[in-house]
Amino acid sequence: MDRTTILILELGLFLLLILFCTIFAMLCKYRLAQSLPTLSSMTGSTASVFFAGAKNLRASLDFSPLGEASLPESVPASGNPDTEKPATNGEGSSSDPLNPDGTSGSYPSGPSGSSGSWDGADFPGPSVSDPQVNRRALELLNSMSLEEKVGQMFIVRFPTDRMVETVEQYHLGGYILFARDFKDRSPEQVLTMLNACQDASPIPLFMAVDEEGGNVNRVSRYSQFRSAPFPSPQELYLKSGLSGVRQDSLEKSALLKDLGLNVNFAPVADVSTSSDDFIYQRTLGQSASLTAEYVDTVVYAMKEARMGSVLKHFPGYGNNADTHTGIAYDNRSYESFTSSDFLPFEAGIQAGADMVLVSHNIVSSMDGNAPASLSPRVHEILRQHLNFSGVIVTDDLSMEGVRQFTSDTQVAVRAVLAGNDLLCCTDYGVQIPAVLSAVQDGTISEDRIDESVLRILRLKISLGLL
């Protein structure tokens, strides 16, 4: 065989290889087009899954404040596994009347059906899913008295006096501070005051605050802490987009940590686009999908700073009245929650949010007989369908939206029975003894207390408090 023939054969083989590669690429493209929705048709959790890889570009991308060039940035569902089994009707099948076949229905469980693959690897400190964290938390739990365990379930309003003595007397889980606690104090005085409380507690305290920005600034409203108050989410987003949101969250976290605070009751995950809504000024003021991007960005920044995050107000405030002043009824359809209000909470949970705060709204499509904060059904939805396994915290139990529903002595007991882990309250002198009595008379099992305290201890370890 002469050289010319060999060259012709080699050229032919080369062309055949190119043809094969072209056909293979076309087939792959066809299969991808068949298996994935087009970009223009993506909504909700589908878009979140498709763009999961965008988290790797988080620090370098500058997102448009109007959202025209921004992409959803969710990650796999939160990996904070708890020891409890999903609630069933006792026969191994779902007791969910909205979901009789026991499947997740319209609730996503993370990409490709994952029940939670976020492991905290991108952030400082151990994850709550770390086996060593769980082991340490269990050891500590087993060494605690009932009084110590019940006390851990309460995060209470910072008192005007006897701050240290109150910690010692009630074995508190934490304090939440308000504007009055910062007004006439310097940064150094605040830090000294909170450190004294921490020193009095064998188990470090959650030191929390609501520093949302805009109308709700407990710290930065005072010039001794910051030259100007933090802007509202709406103002910040319209001016600087999600890159500005991220930087703002990092700066907030740094300021709060310097003062001895370790939890910020933020971000607001409620969806509101009408200025007539009570909650509107505290929200992003954008669609559910853009609000989900915002929540995802804030939670990631807070985890990077090792600042505890709280999604609020589950299951979504909507256009409801102010529960600080009375009972609020929400008569929206269940589908309106799954298609809109749940999306930012799902994004925050997938991003690894530490806590979810449950509102006092009475949501008829979920439980028309009790405020969400006191409803086992609402907590079941949050646990089973949104796959949240972190700490659930009540809105303040001193608010009229729940006080008009039940007595001060019973509200904390009902909150524990509903499934809350952490109770936010002012009347702790009444409510802590009420929960203790309920455990002692068998109304609340000690196992139920242990379940919540274990979650709280794991979170405190992951935040570096323990």
Image (cartoon, rainbow, N blue to C red):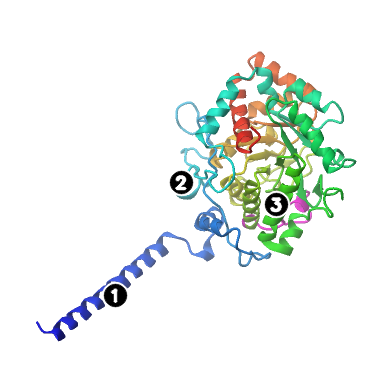
Residue at the disc numbered 1 = 18
Tell me how far mark 3 sits from mark 2, CA to CA: 30 Å
Q: Amino acid at mark 1?
A: Ile
Q: Amino acid at mark 2?
A: Gly
Residue at the disc numbered 3 = 249
Q: Is label 2 or label 1 in front?
A: 1
Tell me how far mark 2 sits from mark 1, CA to CA: 38 Å
Seen from the viewer's position, the closer of residues 424 and 36 is 424
Verify CB contact (< 8 Å) between mark 2 and mark 1: no
Q: Which residue is at a point 65% across and 43% down the rendered structure image?
A: 315
Tell me how far mark 3 sits from mark 1, CA to CA: 51 Å
* Residue 434 location, quadrant: top right
Q: Which residue is at a point 78% across and 22% down the rendered structure image?
A: 430
In the rendered image of this protein, does residue 300 appear above or below residue 375?
Answer: below
Q: What is the span of residues highlighted in magenta in the rendered image?
A: 273-289
Q: Which residue is at a point 74% across and 36% down the rendered structure image?
A: 207
